[in-house]
Amino acid sequence: MTAALRLDGVSFSYGVVQVLADVSLVLAPGERVALLGRNGAGKSTLVRLVTGLARPAAGTVWVGDWDTRDHSPDVLARRVGSVFQHADQQLFARTLEDDVAFGPRALGFERSDVAGRVARALDALELGAQAREHPYDLPPALRKLAALAGALALEPALLVLDEPTAGLDRALRARVTRALLERAGRAGAGGGGAALLVITHDLTFAAELLDRALVLDRGRLACDESLAGLLGAAARLETLGLLRPPVAELSTALDLPGRPIRAADAARVLARVAGGRADP
Amino acid sequence: MTRLILERVTFRYPATEAPALEDVSLEVKGGEVVALVGSVGAGASTLLLVAGDLAPRVVGGRLEGRVSFDGDGPRAIVLPTPWTQLSGMAFTVWDEVAFGPANLGLPRDEISRQVDQAVVRLDLEALTSRDPTTLSGGELQRVIVAGILAMRPALLLLDEPTAELDPVGARTLWKLVRTLAGEGTAIVVATSELDALPAITDRVVWLERGRVAATGPAALLASDALVVANMGTTVAAVWRAAGLPAPYPLTVAHAAQRWERR
Amino acid sequence: MGGLATAVVALALTLTPGASPGSTNTVTAVSPGSRPGLVVFRTALLTAAPFWLFLLLLHDLPTTIAIGLRVTTMVASFVWVVGALPPPRLVEAMVAAGWSASVAYVFAATLAAAPVLRARARRIADAQRCRGLSARGGLAHRLRALWALALPLILSSLHEVDERALALETRRLVPGARRTSLSPPPDRGAERLARWGLVAACAAALGWRLR
Ligand SMILES: Nc1ncnc2c1ncn2[C@@H]1O[C@H](COP(=O)(O)OP(=O)(O)OP(=O)(O)O)[C@@H](O)[C@H]1O
Ligand SMILES: [Mg+2]
């Protein structure tokens, strides 16, 4: 089975400053992966490479079996849906509905197919009530959701999302988590659901949605392991600019069996442990 | 003495009937950190604009009630969209940070001092000669905050100031907020990063649909009402979801204590 | 003859590199706003080229050369100003000369508008391509892509104006503000003399013309 995304020894520079150095990684279809790292580590640059907006100086970026050098971004859009860090720059149309339809229309899908994709994307993010509003009239947090809906409507095999929850409240973050879990889990035409590559500084959100962690450190891939494992290693996290999120911290502090990192898991374990002993 | 007072403020944006803020009263003194929490659209951003004298003066709209401010320094706001806040008039990060203080007409060596201090406080030393338009998201957000701090505001208003910062950078900023309060600055912050609040805030104001639904110390973030509304700390939320009885612990440290004494 | 002389002067000026940015504590940063003289020179010539074509269609050769040189001079000096004068330096210079910061900002923002718009257009086009809009193909196709770009370009600019206004206001870019000039561009005696000389030359030329 071909990987959803593969980077082979990829390097990239802005002028003389190298920001990505010899990065190699593979995402299997349906995999849910966090791309972490401190400010300026090169995460957004990697998004530009995956979407085809920038070309690697060395190495190859494979989206499925396409080399990004052989295909322009508008062709790659059939396989990659992306949300940029500053999603405002991604909204074009006069209503949210129209905006979400932009991608499917540009890719030339049938009218009824477009309508279906738009409805599914808006449903997944519970944006139905805002469908006829102007995207710029929405508060910044909802504009971010609008851009995400636009990417979902492409129904791609790979979603690359740059900080999809920055500035969102907890209820909206939960909405995003639900929508993406559904997309990653759904059996699509190709068999598996969409692979997710999610850039985030919000490790609480990451723990709810993602399984595997890639950490960039000054342009190099510093680690590639299970997210739960990484969140357990507090000292190492801090050298990478990261901190243990509250749930993982709580699991350690209370010595919860299995060291859960998701809120619901922690609550379940906590209830069991507390019920087994005297009421705390 | 720095003091911001909002008295029964109701505010409507231009061409809207429904108020974005309704009957809000709030007092913030120098040295205090007040946190505004609430879901998207609850009015926290609007409240900051009113407190910063931007609404209705620049935004338009209608204000009822009274807003008064006293302080030996300007009031300044960090908006939630860093990419619209660059002056567009600076070649370098250093000049960008100096934009505000220069407009205030401060003497040149004073500007230099303030800018250098803000640069150090936000960990921007390595970026001072960079072109501000090519920064990464988090780098840019730190430059914007530095540009505001360099103006030495008496009232500092922060709208989601850590949205794009890495976790260590966010922790640095939250510590800095406490430091600034220690220096006498009055601070109002709207954030969705609720778990950071117990360590920094004197008071929490919970806004719902433009109204103040509750006010109290940081412990409010562990109260049943806020936890149910998804506005409590993560630890409190986990505690409640586990079916353990109230009062819920506010932080991991509280939870550990409670667990020990069990 | 006079036309030729002014053209030579203007083109020579065009070739000189733009003002160096040197700010209070950065010494060697290369300014992103100022471009090397040669690039500006080429742009200036290219901008003027179409005029020559039309002149040649309408006039005989000597007239074409006479008017063409003048047009080239005008266009070249304008392009030179826009290309070689970094807006932030203009603000500094105007503030140092006693103008209010907000007036200087309006001037500079006008000069900076083109590159800002270009950057925004590129960002929007990038985002549209990532959602499947192809900019290749026949003329009709390209026109459609252009239209798809134009509307969001205008709308998003207008929208951002509101947010930028808030940001500038909070950083005290307000009417009447007395801005401190951070590193006023050096204004040497010779330069001042040259400026007055040019004003005098203009007056003289005008007088000579109206005689
Ligand atoms: N056009 C550019 N010219 C020069 N340097 C650039 C340019 N764009 C980005 N950089 C630099 O490259 C580095 C990587 O940038 P990138 O945007 O990929 O970081 P990031 O990991 O996304 O950071 P953040 O978490 O802050 O968004 C940063 O140090 C940034 O300043
Ligand atoms: Mg980034």
Image: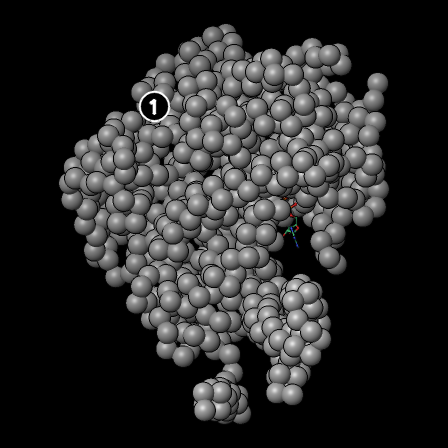
Image quadrant holding the N terminus of chain C, namely: bottom right
* Residue closer to the observer: C165 or B254: C165
In the image, is residue B145 above or below residue A61?
A: below
Q: Residue at x 76, y 48 (%)?
A: A12
x, y percentage for residue B26? Answer: 22, 40
In the image, is residue C19 above or below residue B154?
A: below
Image quadrant holding the C terminus of chain C, namely: bottom left
* Residue closer to the observer: C56 or B225: C56
Residue B214 visible from this viewpoint: no
In the image, is residue C48 above or below residue B155?
A: below
- Protein image colouring: one colour
Question: What's the residue type where badge 1 is placed?
Answer: Leu
Image-based side of C136 in relation to A240, left or right: right
Mark 1, secondary structure of its residue: helix
Whether disc 1's CB lies below 8 Å from ligand 1 is answered no
Around disc 1, counting alpha carbons within 10 Å, would you say few (fewer than 14), some (14 to 19), or many (20 or more)?
many
* Residue closer to the observer: C43 or B157: C43
Residue at mark 1: chain: B
Residue ID for mark 1 = B226
Residue C62 visible from this viewpoint: yes
Q: Residue at x 38, y 28 (%)?
A: B39
Q: Residue at x 52, y 26 (%)?
A: A98
